Image (spheres, helix red, strand yellow):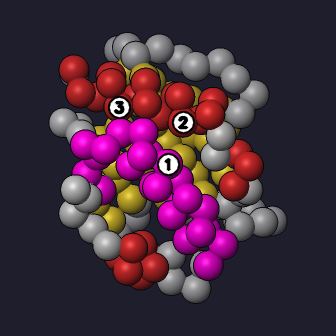
Amino acid sequence: MPDFTFADLMQFFDRRPRELALCQAFVRQVLDACPDTHIRVQKTQVTLENRHGFAFVSLPRRKVKEPTIVVTFGLSYRLVSPRIWQAVEPYPNRWTHHVLVSDESQLDGELLGWVKEAAAFAAVK
């Protein structure tokens, strides 16, 4: 059972209703796919975790034209896709990937598949 409320998300996304809606849709999808997920709403990000954090939602640091959230997840390899906005390897064989999401249609099976893979990776590291 998640240890947060959607009111926590409302506070995080204060005055950003479109970003709130995107985050809520993403969180619901992840909870449906990975029911053992715990969620923590922190000052700078929303953390989705099992044994470790495997996906994160934050706001872009740079100004963007349309309401956007950043979905971040970790894998053991670098994912190559035009959807990946940025990928870094902070530790050997631990790649952090960032995806910009500005429309609910981008919260699709491909992104959810990557997040499920990240959850499995986090559970065994």
Q: Which tag, 3 or 1, sits closer to the chain's start?
A: 1
Front residue of this view, candidates 87 and 31: 31
Which dot marks residue 112? 2
User: Which stretch is magenta?
Assistant: 17-39
Numbered tag placed on residue 119 in the rendering: 3
Label 1 packing within 10 angstroms: few (<14), some (14-19), many (20+): some
In this rendering, the answer to whether 112 lies above or below 35 is above
Is residue 53 inside the magenta stretch? no
Helix, strand or loop at mark 2 = helix
**Numbered disc 1: secondary structure:** helix
Q: Are marks 2 and 1 in contact (CB under 8 Å)?
A: yes
Mark 3 or 1: the one toward you: 1
Q: Which mark is residue 29?
A: 1
Q: Determine the residue positioned at 18% across, 36% down.
A: 51
- Up/down of 43 relative to 119, above or below: below
Question: For the residue carrying disc 2, how many other residues have a C-alpha within 10 Å: few (<14), some (14-19), or many (20+)?
Answer: some
The type of residue carrying mark 2 is Leu
Q: Residue at x 53, y 53 (%)?
A: 26
Can residue 42 be seen here? no
List x then y, in percent, for residue 121.
33, 22
* Mark seen at residue 114: none
The residue drawn where x is 27% and y is 68% is 4
| Label pair 3/2, CB-CB below 8 angstroms | no
**Most foreground residue, 46 or 108:** 108
**What type is the residue that disc 1 sits on?**
Gln
Query: For this rendering, which residue is in front, 9 or 75?
Result: 9
